[in-house]
Image (spheres, rainbow, N blue to C red):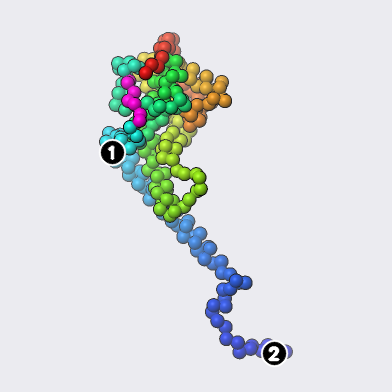
Amino acid sequence: MEKVDLPIKKDKNDKVSPSKPDFGWVGKMILIIIIIVVVVYASVWTFSKFVLENMSIEKEKEIFGKISLNGKEKVFDKKILGDNLGELEKFDIYIQDDKIQNAYAMIGANIFITKGLLENAKTKEELLFILGHEMTHIKNRDVIRNMTRTMPFTMILEFLGINFGNWTFDSNEIIMNYFSRDAEKKADKGGIEYINSLGLNATCANRFFIEAGHNKSKITEFMASHPVDGDRAKFIEDNAKFKDKECTKFEWKE
């Protein structure tokens, strides 16, 4: 039999219907999103590289030095740690009124240390190592690198109105000490070299980490954002000088 086509006029709109949906737009949208993400990532990476290559620590301090301050923090008197603190003299250190043991570097070349950590410290070397560690993060530009690479994404998501429910972006969590293991090891090395430059025994700093490791139920915020293991303690032991020198006792008094 010969096939007969009925003279029924076909409407272009008949191609898409509830029974025959067109999913082609989904693929197009996915492609557009991928292109946007790639362009944004490349732009952010370029911007970050430009900032790191052209902004000195002094300029960072001048521009962003006051951003991380809220007026509630107190200036840490560095003289209680000694008269000659070398490089640390260039950085501003603030005390945060918090019982949680923590220390972190912030944008603007500022270092924060909590009362909880000061009250728990038993030697000056512990504090000097931790402060030297944070100082090295600033010198290595880890803080500003994190900010320049993460904040643009935050701003884009907020601009697009993307809501993650109760989960919000905390600038402290973005900028604070969430660095790679490589960055942490370099900061540890910087902390050790700093104590060595002062002619002090860096192994004295291990007491803080050993005690925290034995009290995992009371793990400090510093330990949570600065992963610690046996290799790290050994790293401090292997790179410390003046091991025969006695630890310098420390007692925090406001």
Q: Position of residue 103 (x, y in %)?
A: 42, 27
Q: Residue at x 52, y 19 (%)?
A: 211
Category of crowding for the residue at label 1, using alpha-carbon neighbours closer than 10 angstroms: few (below 14), some (14–19), many (at least 20): few
Q: CA distance from mark 1 to mark 2?
A: 84 Å
Tally of numbered tags? 2
Closer to the chain start, of discs 1 and 2, is: 2
Secondary structure state at the residue bearing disc 2: loop
- The magenta segment: 72-78
Single out the mark in the foreground, 1 or 2: 1
Q: Is residue 77 magenta?
A: yes
Q: Amino acid at mark 1?
A: Ile
Q: Which residue is mark 1?
A: 63
Q: Is residue 204 above or below residue 181?
A: above
Q: Which residue is mark 2?
A: 2
Q: Amino acid at mark 2?
A: Glu
Q: Is residue 107 above or below residue 41?
A: above
Q: Position of residue 18 (x, y in %)?
A: 60, 71
Q: Residue at x 50, y 45 (%)?
A: 166
Secondary structure state at the residue bearing disc 1: helix
Q: Residue at x 37, y 26 (%)?
A: 95
> In front here: 80 or 87?
80
